[in-house]
Image (cartoon, grey):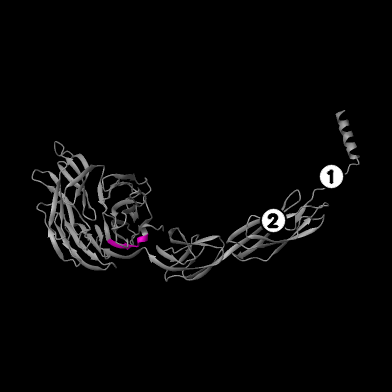
Amino acid sequence: MLRKSLALVLLLAACSDEPAAPAPAALIIDRKSFDFGEWEAGRSSAEQLFTVRNASPANVEAVSVSVEGSDSFTLVSSTCEKYLAAGMECEVRVRFAPRLGGTHSARLKVAGAPSVEQAELQGTGFAWVDIASMPPGTRVMAGDDSFMCTQPCRQVVRKAEVTLYAPSEGFPTWGAVCASAPRGGCLLRLDASKSVALEAWAPLYQWEVRRSRPPMKVAPLADGSIVVLDDQGMTLLNSAGQERWSLPQSSTMRLAVTSDGYISGLRYDGAVTQYDYSGRVRWTYTPPESLYSGRLVADGLGNTYLVGSQVNNDATQVLKLVALSREGVALWSAIINEAQTNHTLGLGVVADGSSVYVGGIAFTQAAPPPANPVLVRRFLKKFTSAGTVLWTKEGNWSDMSFAHTGDMVSVINLGSAPGDLIASWTDPEGKELWRAQTPTGQGPGVADTYVFASNAGTAPRLLFGGHELLLGTEAYGRGWFADMGDKSKLVRGPVTYIDSPNGNGAWVSSLALTSPARHVVVGGGFGSSASTAEGFIRLYDARTLKMER
């Protein structure tokens, strides 16, 4: 019964005189896609014609045409105005003018019918990059390795941007068209073809001097000369790395350079000899009692200060601090006796000589001998310019280095690869500003030396140097040095690595900054600290501490 009723309904519907619903309007573009090909950035292609047809028996009352997706495609003209009669056509013209290099895509859209019709548009922009000039012996390379030029050249680039590098280790100077990029690169935004010049290129270091032994200390003079101390003696190099004189003195263990260019050397027994710029002896100070394991510094007035361990007849060991005049005369001295045995950890003086700092560690002998000594305290003392103690502070300090501002850094080298250490920064009044450990396992390597680098009128910085360990071995890899922060925090800056020319590893044993240029003087050895084949001194460009490479 239900089936018969349904059939009747369908029959009645078929016989009805009601007209059928009109077909919906349909607008059709004659091409579903079009590729404009390659065009130079900043230039226009020829216009391309697209035909739109009303493929329905009904008129379209409101036709609209647009290009969406990229401003590199432009709707130049259109006859597709609001009304388009059934079966009629209208025309649209589109031009491709790439704003930048690279692939561009958009959509030509026709609206007015129930469904929007569209055609896919595509085009590629390119730019010529002309390397107009470069210094002899240099190279220019694209950052994506797509090309390299060893002489002036012309390359096509199909990207919005390209970064150029002078891949050799050094510091390039690019033409004005370049924007700065990391690692000294030249960033080009390719909105048109570009011509660029590598105007100059400076190597990482200006000169290198090879030595039979690695230096224990390098100390710059105001005129750019550098005093080098190794286990064979002292040598003065001029600002170009040429040797002026050399004094064979294997007993000298410390150096201090005065503001007027005199060089003081401390012997193992505490005697101090000062030399003039020509290497002639000015004076020698011999302490009444031998002073061992000493430290030596100079203030900005030409005075020299030494501290060392003095062993008394009763087997106690005190520290003796001595201030020497420009003429090598003892101005005053002070005894530091915090316990039965005292050792020095550091010595510093502010530039105007108004304050002197001594760091140390004190023990008492455990009973019965030879039991290990018992730690009493680690201390830092501040003295006046007359040798009076202003204050004494205690802290968890190790080896200490001082700036001419009175700031102090202490470093505990944890001795583990790839270079974990703990460092702290203390202000001139003995207040610890920060204490931090380098991130475990993040290197850049084992720390062999550090220096609290400061010059008059500049804020002090903390520099470290050392070596890498080859993976899974104790063999030395590259040497390295880096800026490791300031009074605000411990933070590693760009790292400069040093390869051995013999492939046997390298390490850094000493660091300093020149004044006022702030070039970096680096001393070290090829091989390892236990088996050094050769030593070296290099004068690095000041930018090594700041520029990523």
Does the magenta segment cover residue 540? Answer: yes
x then y, percent, for residue 197: 47, 69
Q: Choose between 208 and 299: the one closer to the eye.
A: 299
Q: Is residue 157 above or below residue 416?
A: below
Is 269 left or right of 449, judged from the image as shown? left
Q: Amino acid at mark 1?
A: Ala
x then y, percent, for residue 368: 13, 36
Q: Quadrant of residue 190?
A: bottom right
Residue on which disc 1 sits: 21
Does the magenta segment cover residue 487? Answer: no
Is 207 left or right of 38, judged from the image as shown? left
Q: Amino acid at mark 2?
A: Ser
Q: Quadrant of the N terminus?
A: top right
x then y, percent, for residue 313: 8, 45
Is 169 left or right of 46, judged from the image as shown? left
The stretch of residues the image draws in magenta is: 535-543
Q: Choose between 2 and 283: the one closer to the eye.
A: 283
Disc 1 secondary structure class: loop
Residue on which disc 2 sits: 66
